[in-house]
Image: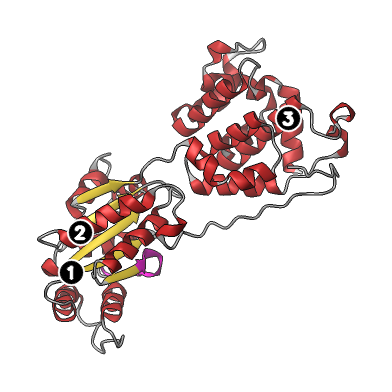
């Protein structure tokens, strides 16, 4: 946030990439043992022909988890195929490119079959025959498909239909990674279904067993990025506020660190009494505004566009009875009513209340919060 020189025009820039971890030695969150257990179950299962779903929200570490699983499957001698669903395109409910890529990766010399794009009705059966031919008798192939929630609906349904056809025989296991609620909504939308449970039932018919990404505690997330957090030179309670906004999601933490790493201090906000440091209250309000903008942009824009509603609205979401607003009225809180269903936002605001105690939370300084929002915008 600021460096030891206290130069208001300087910045201790932080730029952290969001690439998945490749091997278990890079595991920061304890994913590798879980991934190894699932890989062992797949390799040791007496029968294949199943689909495993690895579910978690965007940024929760699914790609790293798949890498650790792939690494363990390789150690166990299982041939694997790695695919990104973004590169798979389907037509008429079939995915010839998916079948072609599976065959290409399983063949040691990687030839492309001349007749792979034949009649759609024969494609799934052809894949099953290819796997029987290319996979050793005592092994099973594991096809790992990542980023399923980044597909167009037509491609998504085509891939799921292929998995649900069971045409690949007993020597193939599919592993898919996705944000399950997104997949359910996409399937329901594709078929024009109005029932809330249509997408869930459809996915349950395709995926035979599921694994939900393990939660990451706020403490573990903070420890994993402790070096970058220390570089921000923030007070401890404000570091805790950043961790609370990240909510156990590594991608969110990275975005927050990158946002704070490029923060500059305007000269007027420094304190002569604190040797150039930001005053405690101002720092807390600014950190809150930046967390809100980075992780909850809709609520942030509502605050920016309705400054008179901000205090009452955030009170409403965070348990307003603890800090009743002198200016509270229902009409000012109405702008924030849609966010009452946003459990992540409400959880963050409630944590901010706990972190700030015994002081009031940052939004109880509405004028300062609006100044912080203006500064963040600038």
Q: Which residue is mark 3?
A: 370
Q: Which residue is mark 2?
A: 42
Q: CA distance from mark 2 to mark 3?
A: 54 Å
Return the residue nearer the eye: 340 or 9. 9
Q: State if disc 2 and disc 1 touch (CB < 8 Å).
A: yes
Which residue reaches farthest right?
272
Q: Of callouts 1 and 2, which one flags the residue occurring earlier in the amino acid sequence?
A: 2
Left or right position of 283 against 357: right
Quarter residue 241 falls in:
top right
> Which residue is at a point 84% across and 41% down the rendered structure image?
6
Name the disc covering residue 140, or none. 1
Return the residue nearer the eye: 309 or 371. 371
Where is residue 21 shown, x and y percent of the image?
A: 46, 59
* Tag 1 secondary structure: loop
> Which residue is at a point 62% across and 39% down the rendered structure image?
293
- In reply to whether residue 87 is colored magenta, the answer given is yes
Residue 51 drawn above or below residue 56: below
Where is residue 31 shown, x and y percent of the image?
A: 38, 50
- In reply to whether residue 146 is colored magenta, the answer given is no
| Residue 247 visible in the snapshot | no
* Tag 3 secondary structure: helix
Left or right position of 18 against 262: left
| Nearer to us: label 2 or label 3 | 2
Quarter residue 306 falls in:
top right
> Which residue is at a point 26% across and 89% down the rendered structure image?
114
Quarter residue 278 falls in:
top right
Highlighted range, magenta? 83-93
Where is residue 162 shown, x and y percent of the image?
A: 21, 65
Residue 234 drawn above or below residue 153: above
Q: Of callouts 2 and 3, which one flags the residue occurring earlier in the amino acid sequence?
A: 2
């Amino acid at each position: 946030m600021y460096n030891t020189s206290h130069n208001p025009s300087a910045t201790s820039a932080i730029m952290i990439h969001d690439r998945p971890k490749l091997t278990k030695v890079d595991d920061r969150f304890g994913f590798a043992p879980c991934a190894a257990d699932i890989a062992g179950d797949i390799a040791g299962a007496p029968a294949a022909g199943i689909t495993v779903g690895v579910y978690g929200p965007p940024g929760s570490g699914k790609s790293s988890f798949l890498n650790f699983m792939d690494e363990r499957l390789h150690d166990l001698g299982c041939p694997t195929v790695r695919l990104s669903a973004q590169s798979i395109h389907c037509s008429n409910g079939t995915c010839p490119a998916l079948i072609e890529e599976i065959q290409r990766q399983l063949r040691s010399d990687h030839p492309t079959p001349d007749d792979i794009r034949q009649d759609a009705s024969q494609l799934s059966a052809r894949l099953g025959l290819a796997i029987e031919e290319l996979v050793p008798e005592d092994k099973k192939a594991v096809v790992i498909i990542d980023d399923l929630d980044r597909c167009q609906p037509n491609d998504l349904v085509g891939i799921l239909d292929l998995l649900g056809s069971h045409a690949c025989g007993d020597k193939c296991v599919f592993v898919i990674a996705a944000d399950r609620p997104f997949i359910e909504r996409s399937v329901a939308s594709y078929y024009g279904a109005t029932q809330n449970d249509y997408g869930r039932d459809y996915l349950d018919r395709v995926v035979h067993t599921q694994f939900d990404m393990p939660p990451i505690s706020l403490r573990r997330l903070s420890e994993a990025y402790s070096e970058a957090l220390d570089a921000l030179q923030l007070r401890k309670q404000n570091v805790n506020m950043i961790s609370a906004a990240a909510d156990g999601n590594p991608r969110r933490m990275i975005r927050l660190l990158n946002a704070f790493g490029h923060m500059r201090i305007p000269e007027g906000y420094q304190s002569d009494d604190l040797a150039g440091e930001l005053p405690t209250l101002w720092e807390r309000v600014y950190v809150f505004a930046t967390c809100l903008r980075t992780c909850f942009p809709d609520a942030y824009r509502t605050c920016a566009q309705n400054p008179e509603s901000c205090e009452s609205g955030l009170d409403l979401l965070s348990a307003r009875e603890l800090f009743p607003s002198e200016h509270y009225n229902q009409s000012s809180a109405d702008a924030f009513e849609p966010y009452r269903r946003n459990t992540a936002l409400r959880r963050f605001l409630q944590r901010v209340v706990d972190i700030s105690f015994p002081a009031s939370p940052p939004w109880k300084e509405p004028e300062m919060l609006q100044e912080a929002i203006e500064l963040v915008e600038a």
